[in-house]
Every structure is written in C-alpha cells, then in structure tokens.
C-alpha cells in the first residue's frame, strides 16, 4: 500500500500556509522555561557565527552537523565571525550536561550550554523555529529559553528481527529521534523470525538465521506467503550506524533477546541451542510466541551466549546491553532432562528461575571483564516473576506489560526502571479506528492524544522517584514491512513520547501540543518523512478554506 497519497503536496501547501501564520516558537518538546516578546530577529544575508573552543572541537562538530539545516531555514549564508557575531555559542560550566539556554533578541542569537549535547539540543530548538523554505532571510520571534530534560532516558525501540528496514532507514529514524531530543536507540536485532546482526564466531546465525520462507508473517486467518525474506547488518554496518547516532547524541542499546524469542538462532545451531536437536528447526514464519527456546542447561549454549556478548561489547561502547527476558515459554525445559536436573541443582521448583540462572552466568561473565568492558543489563519486566536475587542489583527493568505496576514493583525491589507501557507507547499499533487504516495491531485507540496523555510516574512515592530512569516508545514490526509504513505509524506519535521524556509534567497539555505539532508538518514534508495525517487534519477548518482536502 502506498501511503503517500496524491493529495500530499496539496495538503502540505495548505497546512504550510496555516503554519506560517502561527505566532511564537512552536518547539517540541516544550522547553521547561520559555518567554516570548513582540520583538524579532532577522537573519542577515551573511549570518556570522562564533563558537567556543571545546575538547576535541566537539562544539564545532555539533554546529557543523546542523549548520546546513540552520542556513536553509534562515535563508542565509553562515560564515565564521571573529568578533561579535549574529549567532554566538558560549560555554557555561554551571549548567547540566544536556541543558541549554537560548536567547533570540533583535541583536542576535546567544546559546549557552556546558556540554556539546546541550548545544545540539539548543540548535534543534532553533531549527524548529525557522521556516522550511524562506524566500528571503528569515525573521523569527524574540524568545528566552532555559531548558533541561525531565528524564535522562528518552528512548525509542525498533524491532528489526521480524522485518528489517536497512541502514538508510535506520539513519532516518535516528534523525527523527534527534529532532525531538531523544537519546537512546534500543535496537531489537534478534527474534524467532530473524537474526539480524553478524556474529563472526557463529556465522550460521546470519547464513541460516537471517533468512526465512515468508515475507509477511502468518497470524490467525493470515497464512505466511512463499516469498523468501532475508537481511542482516554486518559488523561494519553496525559501527557506521553507532557512529551516526553518536553524532546526534544518541546511544545505541542492542537487544539480543535470549533465551526466548530465539527460534531463528535455534534453527541455525540446533546442535547447541535446541532442547530437542533431533527434531527439525526452521526460522519461524508466524507472529506470536514460539516455544522453541534455547536450552539453558547446555553449557555449550551458555558459552555461545557469552561469545555473542563478547562481540557485542566493542560494537556498542555504552553502558547497557538488553538481553530480553520477555515471553519465554518453559514448555520445552519442562520436558528436558538436563533442564529438570539444573532446576533441582539451583534449588527451585519455578522453571522461570532457569532463565534467571542463565542470566546470572552471563552477568558474572561480564563482571569478570576489565572495567572498560563492563555493561549493565536491561530486561523486560517478566524477569520479576523469578528470583531476581540471583541477578545483579544494578540491572534495569523495562516495564511494558502492566507497566505502571511492574515499574513500581521493580523500584520497590531497589531496581531502576524504564516506562515503556504497551498501551499507549507501542506506536506500531493502529493510530485511528477508521476501517481504512492499514492493517496493524490494535483497534486504533492509540491515537496521538492517547499517547500524549499518558502520565509517567503517576502517584509514584517521592522516595522511589530516583529509580525511574525515563520513558521509551516501542515499535514492533510484525505487520510492518516497508519504511513508509514504519514512518506512518511512528510520526508524529514519537514527538508525543519525546515531550513526556523532556518536559515537566505540569507544563504538558495536549491542546497546546496539538497546536504546536501542526506547525511541524512542513518540516516532515521537507525531509521526506512519511507520517500519520490525522492530527494535522483534525482542525484544518480553523485555518484552511478547504478542510476536506486536508482530511485526505
């Protein structure tokens, strides 16, 4: 289905006219403190800029990353100035690592930050204030902003185990995240339906595990097709994407989902991973939860998991690795003699504890490494169903199912937690109940308004607040095959989650957000981002003479 309809250009033109008439700085996420005045600043035809010296010229690199977009929106040529400049960046060591101050006055633009990330976010805010294609040097309203994020973890997860979108699309996703000041890209790289990352010690993970016999996945009345589907990222691809993300102040957190959701890996190495290696195993062609999980009682399987982690660590040089932990059926363990014996050995009658014992061994393997190679582990909240005393207490629980309750339980156990509620932060779900919506999960109740109105940490006791690291939107790709569909479901709901992660709760208001997001459509159009048009069309009659055109 081609979601970029023939009315797209007309709708963009009409909404651009509306947006250019809007007053003020329609910045998303809404800054924590902002005041505007009636005065303005007009960019000279040659706009000068002045940058502070900073370690490794990193502030200059930040400016260079966004200077093209700033120059285009300003309708001006940017040139380095020696003395006083039209745009001045200055280091203020007293500010937080992601904080910034931005002042636009008739005399120019001044940006202060303590770290390169703060300058990057300030320039993203400035970029949003600029028109898309000005006919002459732009004029913007005077504004004073002091801004810093509510949460340190502001994430987006992309599932490429079920469908893979490729390097160019992942970079596009990272640009979308950067626009809205998200700083964690959770990359779900393995699934029952495909293994998408090269592991040199185990080449069959991609030789076998990255290919399946159906492009679309079977579910209920829908049968798999017969189209061979394949794809994975080489380690060089991974390094390229990690570097691209780093330039946008986004840390990449890999997820290798083990021991459940591993049928693709089991199909590649049944002799090591299968509980029943004598049976036939294939990369799965269906949605849902496969029972073909890793045999955690096989020392060779544990060693394979350690070897995989050893290859992940240098590829992802950040603090966290996600090892999954969700939806791991114990059926095959209950039928396997070695698993039964291991359960008795660890003194438990809860088969879920086999999973936690497996993680305990992997955590010890990481802890025994040099300090530079230490990583903290993240798990989905199902691990709370086992004996978490077996695991390191610096692990993090990503709460998705019964998210508020699960996060509170994790915090009460002394664990850090990230809120990723299935409802409404799974933004792969339908965003509108109309029967014309493309097939995806849900019934369309996860509208932009529903996503925005979720309140993180509602009624959480003050003494547990420091256990809440932040929020994250998740995107599962069971039904989503094309990049266009991915973007259609992501945008603009990603912006709603971003505002929850950045803006103080008391300043958040959907009607205000809705007004601001409507002015962002020209940005999406100029960058060739696909998006759901529902929120942009909802109030088109307020400023468009032909609202029916905006509804298409």
Image: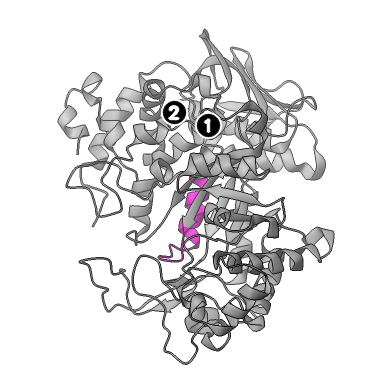
Q: Can residue 75 be seen here?
A: no
Identify the magenta region: 159-176
7 left or right, relative to 462: left
The residue where tag 2 is placed is 131
- Would you call the spot at circle 2 few (<14 residues within 10 Å), some (14-19), or many (20 or more)? many
Q: CA distance from mark 2 to mark 1?
A: 8 Å
Residue 337, position as x, y percentages in the image: 56, 84
Which residue bears the numbered disc 1?
A: 127
The percent coordinates of residue 221 (x first, y second) are: 20, 66
Instruction: Look at the numbered disc 2 and give the secondary structure of its residue.
Output: loop
Q: Residue at horizontal 80%, vertical 27%?
A: 93
Residue at 41%, 56% (x, y): give it: 476
User: In this picture, is 213 found above or below 451?
Assistant: below
Q: Is residue 171 magenta?
A: yes
Front residue of this view, candidates 475 and 66: 475
Q: Nearer the viewer, residue 28 or 122?
A: 28
Residue 59: percent from left, percent from top: 72, 38
Residue 485 lies, in percent from the top left, at 33, 53
How many labels sit on residues?
Answer: 2
Quarter of the rendering containing residue 216: bottom left
- Using the image as rendered, state which of residue 89 and residue 444 is in the foreground: 444
Asked whether the viewer can see residue 355, the reply is yes
């Amino acid at each position: 289905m081609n979601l970029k309809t023939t009315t797209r250009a007309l709708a963009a033109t009409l909404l651009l006219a509306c947006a250019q008439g809007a007053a003020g700085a329609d910045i998303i996420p809404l800054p924590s403190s902002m005041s505007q005045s009636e005065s303005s600043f007009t960019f000279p035809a040659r706009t000068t800029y002045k940058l502070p010296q900073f370690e490794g010229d990193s502030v200059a690199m930040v400016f260079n990353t966004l200077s093209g977009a700033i120059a285009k929106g300003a309708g001006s040529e940017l040139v380095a100035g020696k003395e006083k400049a039209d745009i001045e960046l200055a280091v203020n060591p007293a500010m937080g690592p992601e904080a910034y101050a931005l002042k636009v006055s008739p005399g120019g633009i001044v940006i202060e930050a303590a770290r390169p990330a703060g300058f990057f976010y300030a320039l993203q805010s400035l970029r949003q204030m600029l028109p898309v294609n000005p006919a002459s040097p732009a004029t913007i309203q005077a504004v004073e902003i002091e801004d810093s994020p509510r949460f340190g973890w502001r994430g987006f997860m992309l599932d490429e185990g079920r469908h893979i979108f490729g390097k160019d699309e992942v970079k596009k996703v990272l640009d979308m995240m950067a626009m809205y000041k998200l700083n964690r890209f959770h990359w779900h790289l393995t699934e029952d339906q495909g293994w998408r990352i090269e592991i040199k010690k185990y080449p069959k993970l991609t030789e076998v595990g990255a290919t399946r016999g159906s492009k679309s996945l079977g579910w209920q009345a829908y049968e798999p097709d017969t189209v061979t589907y394949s794809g994975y990222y080489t380690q060089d691809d991974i390094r390229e994407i990690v570097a691209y993300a780093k330039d946008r102040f986004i840390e990449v957190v890999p997820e290798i989902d083990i021991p459940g959701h591993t049928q693709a890996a089991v199909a590649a190495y049944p002799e090591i991973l299968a509980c029943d290696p004598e049976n036939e195993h294939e990369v799965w062609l269906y949605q849902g939860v496969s029972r073909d999980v890793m045999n955690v009682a096989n020392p060779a399987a544990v060693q394979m998991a350690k070897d995989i982690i050893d290859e992940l660590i240098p590829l992802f040089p950040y603090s966290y690795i996600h090892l999954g932990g969700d939806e791991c059926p114990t059926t095959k363990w209950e039928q396997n003699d070695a698993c039964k014996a291991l359960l008795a050995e660890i003194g438990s009658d809860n088969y879920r504890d086999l999973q936690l014992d497996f993680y305990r061994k992997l955590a010890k393997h990481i802890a025994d490494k040099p300090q530079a190679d230490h990583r903290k582990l993240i798990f989905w909240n199902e691990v709370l169903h086992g004996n978490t005393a077996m695991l390191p207490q610096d692990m993090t629980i990503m709460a998705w199912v019964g998210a508020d309750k699960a996060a509170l339980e994790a915090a009460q156990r002394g664990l850090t937690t990230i809120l990723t509620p299935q409802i409404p932060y799974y933004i792969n779900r339908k965003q509108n109940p109309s029967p014309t919506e493309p097939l995806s999960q849900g019934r369309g109740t996860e509208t932009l308004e529903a996503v925005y109105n979720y309140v993180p940490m509602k009624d959480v006791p003050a003494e547990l607040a420091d256990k809440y690291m932040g929020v994250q939107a998740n995107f599962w790709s069971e039904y989503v095959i094309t990049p266009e569909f991915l973007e259609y479901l992501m945008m603009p709901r990603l912006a709603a989650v971003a505002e929850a992660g950045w803006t103080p709760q008391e300043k958040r208001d959907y009607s205000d957000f809705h007004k601001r997001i409507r002015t962002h459509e020209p940005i999406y159009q100029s960058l060739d981002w696909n998006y759901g048009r529902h929120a942009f069309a909802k109030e088109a009659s307020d400023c468009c003479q032909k609202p029916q055109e905006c509804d298409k």
